[in-house]
């Protein structure tokens, strides 16, 4: 199982079909493509018949929701995963289109900042085979980070973020977008399970989680690849205590190693599968009543 991964249609590096094939090769049978603000990758895989036999591929999305006036959370964002959403929902598509427009505006603004800082990446963005913004439905900072690396202005994606692209750094620009309650609402209206992604602070932020449950949150990303075991245990306790289904995933983007390596580093116990399938309304290996 892996219910959190990105393709080139947002800020990942792999083509959607290649990501799905890599997941299948790693033994994943329940998989979600969760690109930021777009279902383009999921749709392509389905349309081209590239869903491997025996794999349940979920339509997914990750919405980086903006938190206003709730203290100092990470970059004032909460990331909400929509899992098993209806890919034909017009309402969701129109909301995501607005989100993508804000991303493009921000992307252009950050490129302009880099120009002012004498760190222009414009030529790489236009010519490098790795980075074609017009192929990318949903532009994100990792794309700019990779361009900075290609230009020799940064040694890694992390280096680019920590010196230039993170909140408070010189090339950072804030983005407009949905707040977490709006993100959860639109996911639910499109028939999806809304799960709060990589929220390691959950045990200290129970009130926040409760507020989101009142808005329709149904899951918590307990088995996140880079959580250590104590963090998984703490977040798992919150899920159990508040009645949220535990989700999990690699959040694979393609920068650090192969998909197989990322998947090997993911602790996602088999016992988590039945409740998850039930919450997603999937039959198959779900526990029978
Ligand atoms: Zn995220
Ligand atoms: Zn992600």
Image (cartoon, rainbow, N blue to C red):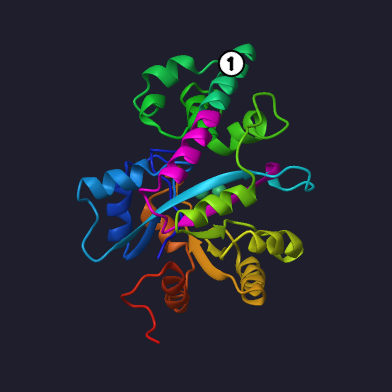
Q: Is residue 172 left or right of residue 23?
A: right
Q: Which residue is mark 1?
A: 112
Say whether residue 28 is visible. no
Please name the residue shown 70% across and 64% down the image: 210
Q: Residue at x 41, y 26 (%)?
A: 133
Residue 94 belongs to the span the image colors magenta: yes
- Is 173 drawn above or below residue 212 in the view shown? above
Number of marks present in the image shown: 1
Identify the image quadrant of the N terminus.
Answer: bottom left
Please indicate whether residue 262 sits to the left or right of residue 28 in the image. right
Residue 227, image quadrant = bottom right
Q: Position of residue 127 (x, y in %)?
A: 37, 18
Residue 214 appears in the rendering: yes
Nearest to the observer: residue 1 or residue 118: 1
Q: Which residues are magenta?
A: 75-103
Which residue is painted at 63% across and 59% down in the image? 215
Q: Position of residue 91 (x, y in %)?
A: 46, 44
Residue at 40% across / 32% down in the picture?
136
Q: Is residue 262 left or right of residue 241?
A: left
> Does the magenta segment cover residue 209?
no
Q: Position of residue 220 (x, y in %)?
A: 58, 64
105 relative position to 22: left or right? right
**Is residue 194 placed above or below 176 in the rendered structure?**
below
Q: Residues within 10 Å of mark 1 (few under 14, many from 20)?
A: some
Secondary structure under badge 1? helix
At which x and y percent is residue 201? 70, 59
- Quadrant of image for the C terminus: bottom left
From the viewer's side, name the closer residue of 94 and 82: 94
Choose top left, top right, bottom left or bottom right for residue 204: bottom right
- Which residue occupies the foreground of this view, 192 or 264? 192
């Amino acid at each position: 199982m892996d219910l959190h991964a990105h393709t080139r249609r947002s800020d990942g590096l792999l083509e959607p079909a290649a990501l799905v094939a890599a997941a299948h090769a790693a033994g994943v049978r329940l998989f979600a493509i969760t690109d930021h603000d777009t279902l383009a990758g999921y749709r392509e895989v389905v349309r081209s018949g590239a869903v491997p036999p025996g794999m349940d591929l979920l339509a997914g999305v990750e919405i980086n929701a903006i938190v206003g006036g709730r203290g100092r959370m990470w970059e004032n964002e909460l990331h909400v995963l929509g899992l098993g959403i209806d890919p034909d929902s017009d309402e969701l598509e129109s909301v995501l289109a607005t989100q993508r427009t804000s991303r493009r505006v921000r992307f252009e603004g950050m490129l302009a900042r880099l120009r002012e800082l004498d760190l222009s990446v414009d030529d790489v963005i236009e010519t490098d085979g790795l980075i074609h913004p017009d192929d990318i439905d949903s532009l994100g900072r990792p794309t700019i980070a990779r361009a900075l690396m290609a230009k020799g202005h940064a040694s890694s994606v992390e280096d680019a973020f920590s010196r230039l692209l993170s909140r408070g750094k010189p090339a950072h620009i804030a983005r407009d977008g949905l707040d977490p309650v709006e993100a959860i609402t639109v996911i639910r209206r499109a028939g999806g399970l809304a799960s709060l992604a990589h929220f390691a602070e959950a045990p200290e932020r129970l009130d926040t989680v409760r507020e989101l449950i009142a808005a329709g949150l149904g899951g918590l990303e307990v088995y996140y690849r880079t959580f250590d075991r104590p963090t998984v245990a703490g977040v798992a306790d919150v899920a159990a205590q508040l009645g949220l289904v535990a989700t999990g995933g690699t959040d694979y983007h393609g920068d650090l190693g192969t998909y197989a390596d990322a998947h090997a580093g993911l602790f996602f116990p088999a016992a988590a599968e039945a409740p998850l399938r039930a919450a997603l309304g999937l039959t198959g290996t779900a526990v029978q009543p």
